[in-house]
Amino acid sequence: MTSQIARYLQFCLLCIAVTAVLSACSSSAKEPAPASTPTSPPSPTSLSPSATPLPPTDTPKPTATAEPAAITHLRYVTAVDPEAQDETLDLYYLPGSNAAKPVVIWAHGSDLDSGTGRTFGRILARDGYVVLSLNWQDLVTRGGGTADLREAVEDAVCALRFAAEHGEEYGADPSRVIWAGFSAGAWLGSIVSIGDGDPTAVLDAYAAQNDVPDRRVDCLAAADPAQITAFIPSAGAYPGDFWLGNGDNPFYSELMAPLAEYTAVGHNPDLQVRILHGKNDRAGDTAFDNAQAFADALQQAGYDVLFLPQDGAHESFQTQVIEQILALEE
């Protein structure tokens, strides 16, 4: 009995030993567990989404560039004489501009129409000028008489009234007016540029004393005529007996008699004059020598004058006229 118990105990101890050995082998076969490391909350990343930053407040913002606009066939003269004509002008300006640059009046020659002022007007309007291109009818240089002269001068005065009354509405400074014109338009400008104020009273007085027509047209603008501050003619007609009093041409002496005092050299002394003329212009009253004599007379009278001979003959030289207009603002 005792020996049986002993053998049983030995058997139990053997089982315990075998179990221990098997348990150890099993543990050594497993991968060791990685050592645990402390963790911390994730830090903010620089790639996290955020609002798009605004540009600096002093960054200039682009603005739309306005294109020049035109109002064509705008009536500014209405006839009161049955033989006179209503007249219109084309107005070029830059919408929204307040450049306060001069009003520029363009008067075409006797054989040209309003189309000559279209490109001229748009180029200057793009730079902030207000341009009035006159659709006037020249009958004077085609052999017309005193009535035609009066109507032409009244047309010019009406344009100056329009400039004074409406120039600021379109962004111009109506106290500064530049008259630019070609051929007969330059001739008309020479009268009103050097003229002394409004010639209406002078023309009325002459009509009352002589057998010549009375008032021909009415101006639609009521303001006093603006003063011309610069005169830039091209290929103009400047008859010597009109400006210099040499009396060689009785036609012009008689024609200009109503305005002899009004246009006497010496009026409007602050006028700036830039005369462009083709070196090969030999067309009668527009001959180069006449333009040279006219420029000399104005210089001797103390005006600010530049005489600018050009290669060519009887041409408008609009590109050069534009250059001179822009140069006055430099």
Image (cartoon, rainbow, N blue to C red):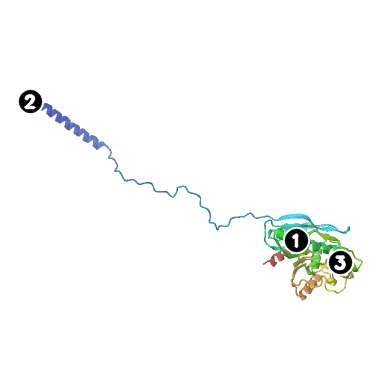
Compared with 50, 212 (above or below) is: below
Residue 102: quarter of image = bottom right
The residue positioned farthest toward the front in the image shown: 222
Q: Secondary structure at mark 2?
A: helix
Q: Which residue is mark 2?
A: 2
Please name the residue that numbered disc 3 is placed on.
Answer: 204
As shown in the figure, which amino acid type bears the numbered disc 3?
Asp
Name which quarter of the figure residue 109 lies in: bottom right
Q: Disc 2 or 3, which lies upstream in sequence?
A: 2
> How far apart are the alpha carbons under marks 1 and 3?
24 Å
Which circle, 1 or 2, is nearer the viewer? 1
State the CA–CA distance, disc 1 to disc 2: 145 Å
Can residue 143 be seen?
Answer: no
The residue under the point 85% across, 67% down is 203
The percent position of residue 91, horizontal first and vertical second, equals: 75, 57
Sequence-wise, the earlier of marks 1 and 3 is 1
- Image coordinates for residue 318, horizontal then vertical, percent: 74, 62
Q: On the picture, is 172 further left or further right than 25?
A: right
